[in-house]
Amino acid sequence: MPGVTISGLTKRYGDVAAVEGLDLVVAPGELVALLGPSGCGKTTTLRLVAGFLVPEAGEIRVGDRCLSSASSVVPPEHRKMAMIFQSYALWPHMTVAQNVAYGLRVGRRVAKPERERRVREILKAVQLAGFERRYPGELSGGQQQRVAVARALVVEPEILLLDEPLSNLDANLREEMRFEIRRLHEAFGITTLYVTHDQAEAMVISDRIAVLDRGRVVQVGTAADLFERPRTRFVAQFIGRTNLVEGVVAAPGVVLRGRLSLRVPAGETKPGDRVAVSIRPHTITLLADEPARPAGAEENGMRGTVRRASYLGAGVDYEVEIEDADVTLRVAAPPPARLAPGARVSLAVPVEACLPLADA
Amino acid sequence: MDRSLPVWALTGALLALLILLPLGWLVALSLSGDGGAGLASYRAAFTDVQLRKALWNTVVMAFWVGLASLAIGAPMAWLTARSDLPGKRTIRALMLASFVTPPFLGAFAWVMLAGPNAGLLNKLYRDLTGAQDPLMNIFSMTGLVFAVTLYTFPYVFIMIANTLELIASDLEEAAAILGARRFTVAVTVTLPMVAPAIASGFILAVLQALALFGSPAILALPAGFHTITTQIWSYFQYPPKLELAAAASMPLLVATALLLYLQRRLLGRRGYASVGGKTGQRRAVSLGPWRWPAFLGCLAVMTCSIFLPYGVLARAALSRAWAQPLSWDNLTLGNVWFTFWQYSATRSAIVNTLELGVMTATVGAVMAALLAYTVNRRLVPGSQVLPFLVLAPVVIPGVVLAVGLFIAYTRPPLLLYGTLWILFAAYLTKELPVGYSQSDATFRGVHAELEEAGRILGAGRLRVLGEITAPLARSGIIATWCFIFIGVIRELSASIILFTPNTKVMSVVIFDLKEEGQFGAIAVLGLFMLLMTFATVTLMQTLLGRDVLGVRE
């Protein structure tokens, strides 16, 4: 089972670079999600890997084979890959069995009895046994989705590519299929690239996530890495919700914003750097109008006024205006809603939860 | 490199040859003359009083046809699209019939109906009133405009009806809730949204009239005047004056190109014609007491366009003398016998027409499909140029195209004149735009991911084309075939210049029969042509599962 190595990959449409110098290594048997907003180049990257597009520069290697470079591109049909499309792309004029058997018949040239056996097996694996003779038009969205999965898995591809496969499903089914895809990945262990714009989906499904922005990978890591240790404000904002407090580094481990001073982990920042301090809403503790608690050595203390309180059932979402600084923080507190708008509060945030991030 | 590349490249090259060769020769020859290169031919043509008159006549005719088509087509479009008019389906079916009726057949029929002496309507009028003068004379400018309009207004109708169908009622209701009266809503909301369609419908009708050869040849020549198309045709009568014909073709070509450009510009801003999209509800406006009068009005139009002409053709086909009263003595199948068995030219013409129809439709449908596919999937670098080339013949009226082809293929290296091939080239070129538009819509409907799914599973591009794309596009391609076939079997304006005694087609034979005054045979052959047309239309409607006119139920 080979992995995928992408280096310096570049694809332009006219003057616009969809992918620019993208580097990514996918280990054998690993599932990596390409995550980013629309237009970040994630689908273009996937289609370059599939061989539908020719890169202007860079290379795509699978194992020790070079599949794509600016000078030569192996056509998609010779790549031993499979792909699941956003539209499912099931052929409406073929039955479920014909759809699933296509890759075995055309690409792998498997003999008929063997073909039929494998189609039966894979349909069982995706819980579609008995649907062989149906046409795609006669299936529900979720069933079509599973046919698409079966059609891709049955050929036992070296690499599996998925292009936002769940975006056409309704919310409940989508959640169910996330676990289903993860389960299938654990069962088959195929090296997989998974394109999505939904961070929750990426976090559930993948081993590692590559966050893409403007045609480049800005950070790669596990879901926890990205959430707890984002390297840029883009990543911090894209993975989960966060507060960003703009400020200037005054001394190692101290960021100033107006008259507000925040202690942060002393990292790579130098005095004079402009940074944004990311503070996750759930890391802030709210204390009702008590005298300002003397901040512990590991805590930042602030005072403020509640401006808005929204009861969300599982929690309460507060908007708190901080004194002495032109800053409003969102705070996620456990229920019940004890504080009304106008209430004066003090806030406490652990120093290690305040991450200074550079602009890039 | 992709092994399928030659297929796409070759199709593109063939297209270029097909279109650029005749056009190139047309321009080249118009610029050459007795005195070498120069504008001599243009000078000769445009100082010719007769040609200038023909040009003027054409402008007058086309303008009035456009206006009259608008006056008939627009209200009918609104009535069928937006009101509670009774019998909408019937009106639409008749509209389709009138749309596919060859205008020259209509013109023939109206000669029998409204010829000054023997015309049935005129005789009826004289019998009823005792008057000496005819009620109307079809051999006149007015008669010509009338007979052309009857088969041109469906273009306006389709244009406007399709646009009206796209305007959701809530756009109008939004204005009403803000206090606008019904009339104000119509003037401030509906009309501005339909305006581009109205203007472009008018242009389409004018274009149609400009390019027409049959109706002017039948109605204007006996009345003693030419239009530009008949004038160009007359340059081909012995001794042929090719340079003059080429030069005279230019204003027609330029005018067509300009008008079409204008129309595209108008429709290019279509964005606001479809605001509200397809999802919006459309509620029918109640006509109240005007329902039935409006229906009768529509019926009257369709009577002139369909019932009377078809009736008189049927009558002429089955009677010994078409102008005599209907009686058992006068009833005969002799015309059928004469047309199909005695008149020598008919049977070979039918064979020629069918051969050309099948051949052009097949080659055209395949070529249109390949081109549309190439463009849709961007298979060849520079494929964005192909639509311009393939749609270019739209601006070439049949007569002009024929002049170009005549010049191009009566000299080496391609000596096609005198064979069916030159007609084939003419029909193929003429029908490609229609075929292409049809195929383009088909391939837009086949999602590219369906093909990519086949590629990634191991099928090459040609295999995917054969196993996945072709089955999915099949009914669309067959419909394209039908469109082209219908276009070919009724073609007259290019055929009339390119035919030779051995390569006559049905429309040309009908034209010949008219010179001989064989009205019964014309009627038989005309009805035969209509029968073939309607059979094809029915096949197409079944395949597409929808109205060919594109008007939704």
Image: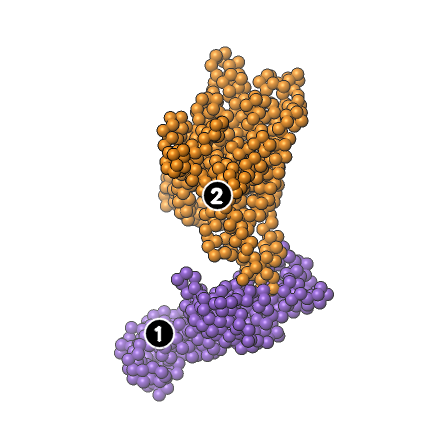
Chain colours: A purple, B orange
Whole-percent x and y of residue B80?
50, 37
Q: Secondary structure at mark 2?
A: helix
Residue at image position (36%, 32%) is B43
Above or below, comparing residue B216 to residue B88 in the picture: above
Q: Are marks 2 and 1 in contact (CB under 8 Å)?
A: no
Look at label 1 and name its amino acid. Asp
Figure quadrant of the N terminus of chain B = bottom right
* Distance of label 2 from label 1 (alpha carbons): 61 Å
How packed mark 2 is, by other alpha carbons closer than 10 Å (few <14, some 14-19, many 20 or more), is some
- The residue pinned by badge 1 equals A359
Look at label 2 and name its amino acid. Leu
* Numbered tag placed on residue B21 in the rendering: 2
Above or below, comparing residue B388 to residue A110 in the picture: above
* Numbered tag placed on residue B139 in the rendering: none
Residue at image position (59%, 38%) is B356
Whole-percent x and y of residue B355?
62, 38
Residue at image position (35%, 88%) is A297
